[in-house]
Image (cartoon, rainbow, N blue to C red):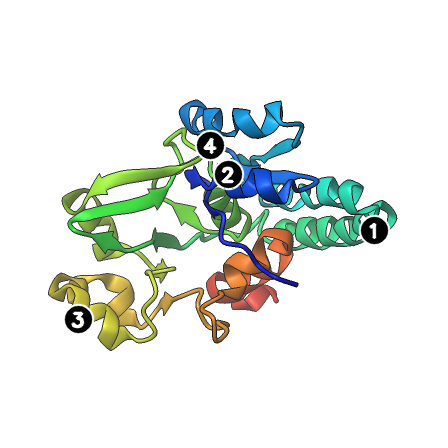
Amino acid sequence: WRIANIGNAFSPNVEMLLEKHPDLVILTALPATKLAQYQTLIQAGIPVLVVSAWLENSPLGRAEWAKLFAVLLEKEPLVNEKFAQIETTYKHLSSLTDYIQTRPSILPGLAYKDSWFVPGGDSYVARLLKDAGADYHWHYKKSTGSLKLDFEAVYPIALSADFWVNPGTVQTIEELLAKDARFREFSPIKKGQVFNNNKQINAAGGNAYWEFGVVQPHIILADLIQIFHPELV
C-alpha cells in the first residue's frame, strides 16, 4: 500500500485525485462553497459520497452510519448484527437512569482564549449526558453543534458543577490548573471529580474515544454512568 497526500477536505488536491481516479471519494458534510471544489471530480465520473454522521443528534444515529459502509463493503449481515447488539446494550444502559432521583450537574469542555465551547442542547454529547443521568445546563440550547460562550457565562456554572468532563488534552489536574488559575475555584476541581476522555491514545496520537467511540457509544455511555452513578453498574 502507498498512501498519497491529497490535502484535506477543505482544500483537496483535485489534480492528484483525478490522477488516482479512485472508485469513490468519501467526504464529511461541508459548506456548499467547499463542496463546489469537488464538482470537477463528479464531472470526471468519480463518485463523491457525503457522510454527515457528525450532524446526528443521537449517539446511536451516528453509529448507524456504519450500515452505509457495510453496503459499500458488502458486509451488511455482519454490521446489522453488530449494530443490533450495540443498540440493545445502549438502550438497556440508558434505561438504568430513567428513574434516578438525583442528576449531577456537568461542566463540559475547556476554555480557549477566554471562549468556552460547549455542546449544543440537541447534540449527541448532550444526549449522552442525558442518557447517563446527568443534568446538563445548556440542554435548552437548540443546536447540534458547539456553542461559543464567554468565560464569564460558564464561570458560575463551573463554581457549582458536580463533574467536569472532557477538559481538552490534559492528563493531570496540575496541567489543567496551569492553563488558568481560575480553575482552582471550580467545584469539580475541589472535589477531585474531573474526568477526561484521553486514557487510550496510541503512538500516532489517535484517541480511542474519537476513533472507536463513534461506533461504540454503549461503551462511552457505560463509562459515564459509572462516573455519575456508580451504584447503578
User: Whole-percent x and y of residue 112?
Assistant: 22, 52
Task: Give percent across and percent down for residue 36.
Answer: 47, 24
Q: To which residue does mark 3 refer? A: 178
Distance from disc 3 to disc 1, alpha carbons, whole Å, reads: 46 Å
Q: Is label 4 in contact with label 3 (beta carbons under 8 Å)? A: no
Question: Which residue bears the numbered disc 2?
Answer: 15
**Pointer 1 residue:** 81
Q: Earlier in the sequence, mark 3 or mark 2?
A: 2
What's under tag 4, amino acid-wise? Leu
In this picture, is 37 found above or below 201? above
Q: Residue furthest right?
A: 77
Locate residue 32: give its quadrant: top left
State which quadrant residue 179 falls in.
bottom left
Q: Of the residues under marks 3 and 1, which one precedes in the sequence? A: 1
Say which element carries label 1.
Answer: helix
Q: For mark 3, give the secondary structure.
A: helix
Relative height, residue 97 to residue 19 (above, below): below
**144 up-or-down from 190: above or below:** above
Which of 57/153 is in front? 57
User: Residue 30: which disc?
Assistant: 4
Q: Earlier in the sequence, mark 4 or mark 3?
A: 4
Please state if 110 lies on the left or on the right of 166 as rendered. Answer: left
Whole-number angstrom distance, CA of label 2 to CA of label 4: 20 Å
Q: Nearer the viewer, residue 6 or 97?
A: 6
